[in-house]
C-alpha cells in the first residue's frame, strides 16, 4: 500500500497539469488566471485534493499498523476524509468503495 501511495504521489508531480504544492499556490493561480483557465484550475484543485488525501494516508499509515484486518477500515476513513473536505452534505458509501478498492488491489 505504501508503494502504491508513493507511486501515485510521484505521478501527480509528472502530470501535464502542475499539482500545487500548497493551498496558497492554488489560490494564487486562481487569482492570477482571472477566470481564463478554469479547466486548468479545476484539474489543479482535483490533483491538490488527491495529494492531500494521499499524504494523509501516508501519515496515518506511519502512525498506525495497517494490515489485512484493518485496511478496509483505514481506506474507508481516508476516503471519507478526502470526500468531506469539499463535498459538504453529499453522501457516498465509502465502506463499499473501500471494500471494492481493496478487492481490486489485493484480490480479496
Image (cartoon, rainbow, N blue to C red):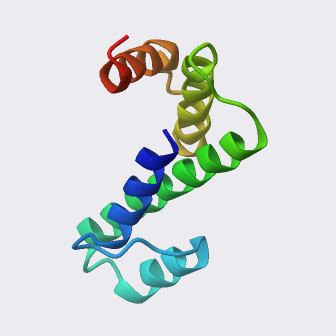
Q: From the viewer's side, name the closer residue of 1 and 31.
A: 1
Q: Position of residue 31 (x, y in %)?
A: 47, 83
Q: Residue at x 60, y 44 (%)?
A: 57
The residue at the far right in this view is 63
Q: Residue at x 37, y 21 (%)?
A: 106
When asked about the image quadrant of residue 76, the answer is: top right
Left or right side of 97 for 69:
right
Q: In the rendered image of this protein, does residue 75 appear above or below residue 24?
A: above
Q: In the rendered image of this protein, does residue 43 appear above or below residue 101?
A: below
Left or right side of 66 for 4:
left
When asked about the image quadrant of residue 13, the answer is: bottom left
Q: Position of residue 98 (x, y in %)?
A: 46, 21
Q: From the viewer's side, name the closer residue of 105 and 78.
A: 105
Q: Residue at x 55, y 28 (%)?
A: 75
Q: Position of residue 22 (x, y in %)?
A: 58, 74
Q: In the rendered image of this protein, does residue 50 appear above or below residue 99?
A: below
Q: Position of residue 15 (x, y in %)?
A: 26, 69
Amino acid at each position: 500500500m505504501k508503494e502504491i501511495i508513493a507511486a501515485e504521489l510521484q505521478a501527480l508531480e509528472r502530470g501535464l497539469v502542475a499539482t500545487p504544492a500548497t493551498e496558497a499556490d492554488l489560490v494564487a493561480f486562481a487569482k492570477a488566471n482571472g477566470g481564463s483557465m478554469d479547466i486548468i484550475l479545476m484539474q489543479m484543485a482535483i490533483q491538490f485534493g488527491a495529494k492531500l488525501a494521499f499524504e494523509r494516508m501516508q501519515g496515518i499509515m506511519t502512525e498506525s499498523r495497517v494490515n489485512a484486518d484493518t485496511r478496509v477500515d483505514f481506506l474507508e476513513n481516508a476516503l471519507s476524509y478526502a470526500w468531506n473536505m469539499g463535498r459538504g452534505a453529499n453522501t457516498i458509501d465509502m465502506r463499499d468503495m473501500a471494500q471494492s478498492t481493496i478487492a481490486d488491489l489485493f484480490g480479496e
